[in-house]
Image: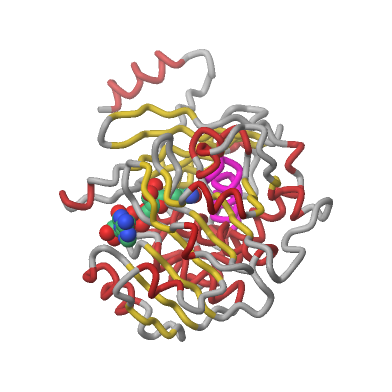
Amino acid sequence: MTETVFNLKPSELAYVPFVSVDNMMRNVRAVGVETVMRGIADYIEEDFRRWESFDKKPRIPAHAPEGVIELMPTSDGKTFGFKYVNGHPGNTSDGLQTVTGFGVLSDLTTGYPLLFSEMTILTALRTAANSALAAKYLAPKGSKTMAIIGNGAQSDFQCLAFKELLGITEIRAYDLSTEASVRLARNLAHSGLNVTICKTAEDAIEGAEIVTTVTADKKLATILTDNMIGSGVHINAVGGDCPGKTELHRDILLRSDIFVEFPDQTHIEGEFQQLDRDHPVTELWQVYAGTVPGRTSQDQITLFDSVGFAIEDFAALRYVHDLLPKTGHFEKLDLLADPDDPRDLYGMVLRSAHAA
Ligand code: NAD
């Protein structure tokens, strides 16, 4: 095992393990992207099964016409976690990411941080893991074909997670930008997935048991209309995750059994914002805990109205925290002041001046 702070008490910590973008990529390469997503899915499932032990609230947003910055905190009474994340659909035209993030895990008994990590790549990994986990309970058994509408930053991860967790072999890709679909097909060329680039969304969903929508546009869009969705399909709606930002026609929602993370947040941000708050939805944690069923019939249209919830990021940070002792791919961040006498903080500043 590498030199580590992971088995020390918080009071013995001299630094905070920090996972940069570079080190996140090394960690992913060290174990393999599919293994990471399977691992994160397991951690999400485990945390959703102990749902009642978590402190839960809708995320805290700051909106601008161009996008949103959000803070996503949660705690299980022992550990606290939060993610800072943005969503700016116009960013890509300036060469910037639509979604970037970073996050922290802390010990709740001392308040000391245990991990500081980039969460741009980690968000893509956890979002895909989360989608595939839900689909394990909701998609038709033996699904082989997934349509993916929106072929941007999240899409490769989605395809790979569905291959790993569900055994998907065929991808039917559509994006307003053919360049985006070509990029996706190129990245997946050696993945074992067979990718067909489609000219329209209608063409993409032809024969697909699973339809993933992961487009970015800050408006009430209609990526899927009612007539496009036949019985028995599972819809994994990922891109509608903000007030005034949706992807599905309301009539699809009325024909679907809707599964959500945290209804209070999904009603503000998800496709669910198109319906009354008292419209019936099922909470995924109950499905994972085995108290309510997932898919119950072949003809049922199931919809995972994904918006991204704090417990998923908490689980992803926990996974990374547990992975680091095995890979050693992190830096030591000097984030904790440690004067000899805890009350003599200014004395530490004085001594540093003498030392300098
Ligand atoms: P991105 O900008 O990299 O890619 C979005 C793609 O959608 C682009 O290629 C764009 O051309 C395409 N697109 C836009 N409108 C379209 C349309 N009408 N038809 C077909 N394609 C269209 O964005 P990204 O990082 O891949 O994120 C995609 C979406 O997922 C964003 O809205 C983001 O906020 C959301 N997201 C959700 C979660 C979650 O947990 N639910 C997590 C991360 C990101």
In the displayed structure, would residue 180 be above or below residue 236?
below
Q: Is residue 288 left or right of residue 355?
A: right
Please check the rendered image and state whether residue 320 is part of the magenta-colored stretch, yes or no: yes
Residue 43 placement: quadrant: bottom right
Q: Nearer the viewer, residue 222 or 291?
A: 222
The structure residue drawn at horizontal position 37% and vertical position 82%, both measured from the top left corner, is 196
Majority SS type along the magenta span:
helix
Q: Position of residue 249 (x, y in %)?
A: 46, 50
Q: Position of residue 98 (x, y in %)?
A: 30, 49
Tell me which segment is drawn in magenta. 308-322
Quadrant in which the C terminus is drawn: top left
Q: Nearer the viewer, residue 174 or 310?
A: 174
Please check the rendered image and state whether residue 340 is part of the magenta-colored stretch, yes or no: no
Q: Is residue 97 left or right of residue 306?
A: left
For this orientation, the residue located farthest to the left is: 94
The structure residue drawn at horizontal position 30% and vertical position 27%, both measured from the top left corner, is 355
The structure residue drawn at horizontal position 46% and vertical position 86%, both measured from the top left corner, is 192
In the displayed structure, would residue 252 be above or below residue 146?
above
